[in-house]
Amino acid sequence: MTKSFRQLETSPARLRVNLWIPGAMAIAGLVLAPILSILWIAVTPTENICRI
Amino acid sequence: MATVLPRYLVTTLALMLGVAALTAAMGTGAAWLVSQYRFPGRNLLGWALLFPMAIPAYVAAYALVDVTDYAGPLQTGLRAAFGWTSARDYWFPEVRSLWAAILVLSLALYPYVYLLARTAWREQSGCTYDVARALGCGPWGMFWRVGLPLARPSIAAGVALALMETVADYGTVQHFGVQTLTTGVFSTWLNGGNAGGAAQIAGVILALILLLVGLERLGRGAARFHRLGRSGRPIERQPIEGPGRWLATLVCLVPVAGGFLLPVGVMLARALESPAGWIAPGLVDALVNTLVVAGLAALATVGAALFLVYALRMAGSRLVQGLLPLTLIGYAAPGAVLALGLLVPLAALDHWLADGVLGLTGWDPGLMLTGTAFALGLAYLVRFFGIAQGALEAAFGRVSPSLPLAARSLGRSPGGALTAVYLPLMRGSVLTAVLVVFVDCVKELPATLLLRPFNYNTLSTRVFELASLERLSEAAPAALVVMAVGMVAVVLVAKGQRD
C-alpha cells in the first residue's frame, strides 16, 4: 500500500452530509409538482367542464 | 355529453394540422435552398430567416390585423384605388379567422424547422449529393429522394417543437377569436370560475403534448444518419441559372417579410405616430418589472438546473439519473397549464402560511406567494427549466472528466470541483443559458397573464392589454422592446450555428 493510501485511511473521519441528491430530488419535485397538481385536480374536480 | 371540450379539441387539431403543414413547407423549402444553392441574397437571407424567432407570435398577429383589417392601409388603399365605398362592394378574406391564426403562427414558428433542417443538411457530406447527381438525379429528385429522407428526423423534431408552441399559444389565437384548448383553460377558469373543468382541459393539452413527443420519437424511429469518415467535404452549392434564381430569393424572402419585416415595420410606424408612448409611466414600470422578475427567474432557473444536472451526474444510480428526462416536461407544458397547476396548491399553501403567521404573531402578512411576483417567477422556472437543463447537460459533457477527477483526488469537495473546475470552463454556456431563459421569460404571455399580482404589468402583458383595447400605438414601444430582447436570442442561436 502506498503512502498516500495510508494517509487516506488514517485521516480523521468527518461527518459529511451529502445534500446533493436530496437537493436534486427537491428541485425535480418542484418542477414536476405543477404537472402532478393539474392531473390531481383534473381527476378529482369539484366541478366538471360545462358549456359556457 | 354536452361539454366545450370537443369544440376546443377540433379547433386545436385543425390549427396544429395547418401549422404543421405550413411550417414544414416554409422551413424545409428555405433550408434546402439556402444549403444547396447559390442565388442573389443567399448569405443575408440565410441569417434573416432566423429573425422571426425574435418576434412573439401575438405581436405578429396585432401587426397583421392592423394592416389588413377594414380600417387598415391595405383595404383603405384598395377602396381608394378601385372606388369602392363599403365592405359590400368587394370581397376580402376574414382577417380574424383560423386561417389567419395558422398563417401567423407558421410565420413565427417556421424557424424551428428551418434551423434544424439546415443544420442536418450542413452536417451531411457533399459526396452523397455528388453521387446522386452522377446517377442522374435532377433537382427535384435530389430533394425528394436524398435530401428529405436524410433530414427527416430533424424536420420532424422542428415541426414537433412548432406544434408544442402552437398548443401553448394564447395571445395569437385570442386575438383572432379562435377557440383552442388553451383559450378554453382561460375561459373555463376565469369566466366560468371552474378550476376543475380548466384542469380537465389542461389534462387534455398535456396528453396532446405527450402524444406529440411520442409521435416525434416514433417518426424518428431507429433512423440515424451519420457522416462516414472525417474527410467528408461540405456540400458544394450549385448556382441557379435564369429567372429561377430570383424565384429562390423570393421563396426565402416571403417568410422573412411576413414573420419579421411586417411586425417590426408596423410597430415602428405605430411607435413613431405617438412618441409620447416611449416615456409613458406604464412602460417604465413594465420594463422594470420585466427586468426584475425575468432576471431573477433566469438566474434561479439556471442555478437550479446547474445543481440538478451536477448532482445527478455525480449519482451513480440509474434510478436517480432517470429524473433528468422527466424534468424536461415543464418546457412542453403550456404556460396556462403550469399557471393553473401552480396557483391552486400555492394559494392553499399561502393561506395556510398567512394563517400560521397571524396565529403566532398577530400580524397578517397577506398572500406572500400568490400576492407577489413569486408565483410568476416560479412558473418561469418550471416552464423554462428544460432549456437551462439541456444547455447545461451539453456544457458538462464538453468538460473532460479527468479534470474534475483530478480536483477531487487533490481533496476538493464536490462543490469545490464545481466552482474551481466546471464553472470557469462552462462560463460561456452558463451565461448563454441565463440569457436564453431571460429572453423566453420576457416573451412568455399566458402564465404571466394568469399569475401576475394585481396592478403588475410586464412588457408582454402591457402589449397584450393595450393591443386588445385596439391601442396599438401605445403598445408598440413595449412590443419593440420585447422584439429587441428577442433578437438577443437570435444572435446567440446564429453564433452557435457559426461555431
Image (spheres, coloured by chain):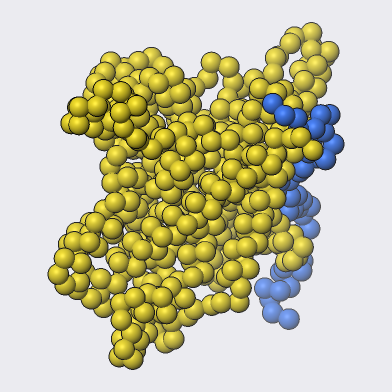
Residue A31 in view of the camera: no
The chain letter corresponding to yellow is: B
The residue lying furthest to the top in this view is: B362
- Indicate the quadrant containing the N terminus of chain B: top left, top right, bottom left or bottom right: top right
Task: Residue A12 in the image: state x and y as whole percent.
Answer: 77, 59
Q: Name the residue rendered at 30%, 28% in the picture.
A: B89
Q: In this view, does B395 lie to the left or right of A22?
A: left
Number of on-image labels? 0
Q: In this view, does B114 lie to the left or right of B273?
A: right
Residue B495 in view of the camera: yes
Task: Residue B480 in the image: state x and y as whole percent.
Answer: 33, 32
The residue lying furthest to the bottom in this view is: B135
In the rendering, what colour is chain A?
A: blue
In the displayed structure, B80 sits above or below B179; it is above
In the displayed structure, B67 sits above or below B42; it is above
- Indicate the quadrant containing the C terminus of chain B: top left, top right, bottom left or bottom right: bottom left
Q: Determine the image quadrant of residue A40.
A: top right
Q: Name the residue rendered at 37%, 32% in the picture.
A: B65
In the displayed structure, B132 sits above or below B325; it is below
Viewer-side residue, B392 vs B342: B342
The residue lying furthest to the front in this view is: B89
Q: Name the residue rendered at 40%, 54% in the picture.
A: B111
Q: Name the residue rendered at 75%, 9% in the picture.
A: B363
Task: Residue A4 in the image: state x and y as whole percent.
Answer: 67, 73
Task: Residue B338 in the image: state x and y as whole percent.
Answer: 65, 38
The residue lying furthest to the left in this view is: B242
In the displayed structure, B370 sits above or below B358; it is below
Viewer-side residue, A51 vs B269: A51
